């Protein structure tokens, strides 16, 4: 039994087959990458896996249980956590508060205790705060903790989202272009962080445009084009696949030639 | 010892409530003061709902109406002491908020605004039309709370305005304390998170529907208690307490003062309660000037009066 199993997942938007019949599986500690040109359906696939979109067809199995169509907050309880390609940051809150929300499932409790500031409420909040501070240090944001999140750079916010997602102590972590918009140094740091988290046993599903990074850290690669899976396998196999070269690596070369 | 933001806010609030009476030219101002406090309590509820959780209600006066009429009716029909009528009103408001909130809090933005508006209108219609029980549009007497007499036996002889100034002032401090507790608590953080990004909130495990409902219920209880205190201090109440204008007033006070902050909301309530009294010298231009002030604040101080003023002061310090 795999940790996460995707079986024939599909969705349409007004006749457009954004994702069609995609299947693959992943185990603990594995880094699996989903690649494909823009508009291939990678983010849509993530949205279905994380419960943001209700799949039109197919099944999603987490630890052998059918979790298809389950709401995101319930999937989060089962150990699934994610980041977003287009940042979803709580802009008005401090960086630290953003990270603490990642501990919501641990820090939540009686609303009455929260309203009356009872010791139980303070203890919960304090434990979450300590965890969040450690996580911020891990992603290099400790010094920005008290700043309003909206004031941070794009690269810093990308790392803040990773910290928030890690706060859930996920078993499966979905990262949608975590290094997009980051400079070379930041990309390398994120790269190292992903490997580190995977080494702790977390299954990581990654969408990333930086091919060097994908080839280096992925155990398995799934290639999407026009919403369909056109190839999968280890990095060496996939990069030799003619269909992949035509659909994806080809367009990348074209982009390089343009610039 | 360094005070936290919450402690500072409470100390400032308590000091203002305690010190301003020293400058009152007449006892009429105690009456204005207690009206400000009672309005502020309702507006704090709006801050929790709109400022923390980002959800709009244009019908919260409905809950004020429930709180007010509980104090008028429960002592007569159920033989309940008015103090317990306040509690009963709050419980009924909480239950109503639960029943109404469950279906309508799925709506967003102006759809939610219109749905809550409908609820408020419904309550005020019932209060105006059920003449046999509520006395209809002409209003109804509210029994005395009886607390002033008890305070008197303890050697403190206050007139009605003074008593209500102190009593609603204390209630306001309590309400502000609870709201400030909430802000920094796990629940408050989750509310602010769903305000910032509902999608991100859900993916970190926040049960968005449940939390919105909790915020709606808490804010309904604030409005209900505000309505109860208004009824008890006036000893008379009309269906206007549940009316559309009262709902709009609550939201306007919150937005004008600064919907994200408890102190800001109280500031907004104070300004909008006092302004009509100050502007009476302009007679028929009163409403015109009110509208103008509100527009100018929104154009030049989008975050509300208090946050904008504080930012300007801090900006000069740096
Ligand atoms: N909510 C939506 N409504 C309509 N079309 C959508 C929606 N989300 C994605 N799409 C479409 O689905 C396709 C796949 O998009 P996306 O998953 O974002 O691709 P990728 O992440 O691989 O770049 C695109 O054609 C996109 O326009
Ligand atoms: Mg995408």
Image (cartoon, coloured by chain):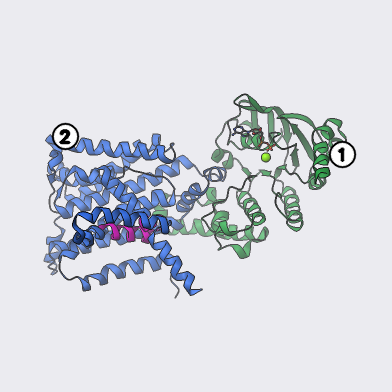
Chain colours: A green, B blue
Place of residue B283 in the rendered image (x, y in percent of width and height, measured from the top left): 18, 57
Question: Badge 2: how crowded within 10 Å, few (<14), some, or many (20+)?
Answer: few
Q: Quick one: SS at disc 2? A: loop
Residue B90 visible here:
no
Q: Which residues are magenta?
A: B256-273
Place of residue B106 in the rendered image (x, y in percent of width and height, measured from the top left): 44, 36
Residue B171 appears in which quarter of the rendering?
bottom left
Say whether residue B154 is magenta.
no
Place of residue B121 in the rendered image (x, y in percent of width and height, measured from the top left): 27, 37
Q: Chain of mark 2?
A: B
Q: Looking at the picture, tell me which residue is in the foreground, A63 or A58.
A: A58
Q: Is B121 above or below relative to B159? A: above
Query: Relative to B56, is B173 on the left or the right?
Result: left
> Marks 1 and 2, Cα distance to the nearest angstrom?
79 Å
Q: Is B162 above or below relative to B125? A: below
Query: Relative to B249, is A214 on the left or the right?
Result: right
Q: Is A158 above or below relative to A1? A: below
- Residue B130's disc is 2
Say whether residue B269 is magenta.
yes
The residue at which mark 1 appears reads as: A236
């Amino acid at each position: 039994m795999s940790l996460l199993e995707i079986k024939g997942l599909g969705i349409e938007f007004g006749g457009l087959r954004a994702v069609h019949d995609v299947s693959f599986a992943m185990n603990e500690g594995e880094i699996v990458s989903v690649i494909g040109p823009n508009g291939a359906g990678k983010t849509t696939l993530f949205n279905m896996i994380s419960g943001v979109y209700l799949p039109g067809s197919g099944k999603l199995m987490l630890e052998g249980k059918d979790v298809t169509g389950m709401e995101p907050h319930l999937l989060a309880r089962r150990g699934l956590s994610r980041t977003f390609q287009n940042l979803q940051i709580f802009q008005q809150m401090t960086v630290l508060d953003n990270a603490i929300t990642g501990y919501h499932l641990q820090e939540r409790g009686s609303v009455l205790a929260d309203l009356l500031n009872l010791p139980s409420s303070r203890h919960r909040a304090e434990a979450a705060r300590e965890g969040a501070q450690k996580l911020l240090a891990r992603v290099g944001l400790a010094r920005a903790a008290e700043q309003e999140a909206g004031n941070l750079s794009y690269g810093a916010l990308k790392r803040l989202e990773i910290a928030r997602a890690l706060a859930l102590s996920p078993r499966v972590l979905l990262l949608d272009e975590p290094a997009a918009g980051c400079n070379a140094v930041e990309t390398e740091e994120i790269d190292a962080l992903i490997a580190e988290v995977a080494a702790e046993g977390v299954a990581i599903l990654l969408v990333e445009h930086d091919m060097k990074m994908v080839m280096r850290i992925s155990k398995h690669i799934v290639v999407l084009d026009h919403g369909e899976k056109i190839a999968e396998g280890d990095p060496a196999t996939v990069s030799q696949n003619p269909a992949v070269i035509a659909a994806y690596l080809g367009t990348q070369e074209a982009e390089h030639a343009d610039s | 010892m360094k005070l936290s933001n919450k402690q500072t806010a409470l100390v400032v609030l308590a000091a203002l409530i305690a010190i301003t009476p020293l400058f009152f030219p007449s006892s009429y101002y105690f009456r204005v003061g207690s009206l400000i406090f009672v309005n502020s309590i309702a507006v704090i509820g709006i801050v929790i709902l709109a400022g923390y959780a980002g959800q709009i209600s244009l019908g919260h006066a409905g809950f004020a109406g429930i709180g007010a009429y509980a104090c008028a009716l429960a002592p007569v029909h159920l033989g309940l002491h008015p103090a317990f009528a306040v509690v009963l009103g709050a419980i009924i408001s909480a239950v109503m908020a639960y029943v109404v909130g469950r279906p309508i809090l799925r709506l967003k933005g102006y759809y939610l605004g219109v749905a809550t508006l409908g609820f408020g209108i419904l309550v005020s219609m019932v209060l105006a039309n059920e003449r046999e029980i509520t006395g209809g549009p002409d209003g109804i007497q509210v029994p005395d709370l009886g607390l002033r007499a008890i305070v008197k036996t303890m050697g403190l002889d206050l007139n009605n305005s003074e008593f209500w100034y102190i009593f609603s002032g204390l209630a306001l401090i309590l309400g502000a304390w609870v709201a400030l507790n909430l802000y920094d608590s796990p629940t408050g953080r989750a509310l602010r998170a769903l305000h910032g990004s509902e999608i991100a909130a859900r993916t970190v495990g926040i049960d968005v529907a449940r939390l919105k409902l909790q915020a709606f219920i808490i804010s309904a209880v604030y409005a209900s208690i505000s309505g109860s205190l208004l009824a008890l201090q006036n000893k008379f109440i009309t269906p206007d307490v549940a009316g559309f204008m009262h709902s709009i007033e609550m939201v306007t006070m919150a937005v004008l003062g600064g919907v994200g902050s408890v102190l800001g909301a109280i500031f907004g309530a104070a300004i909008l309660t006092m302004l009509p009294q100050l502007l009476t010298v302009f007679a028929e231009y009163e409403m015109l000037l009110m509208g103008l002030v509100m527009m100018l604040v929104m154009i030049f101080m989008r975050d509300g009066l208090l946050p904008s003023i504080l930012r300007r002061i801090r900006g000069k310090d740096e």
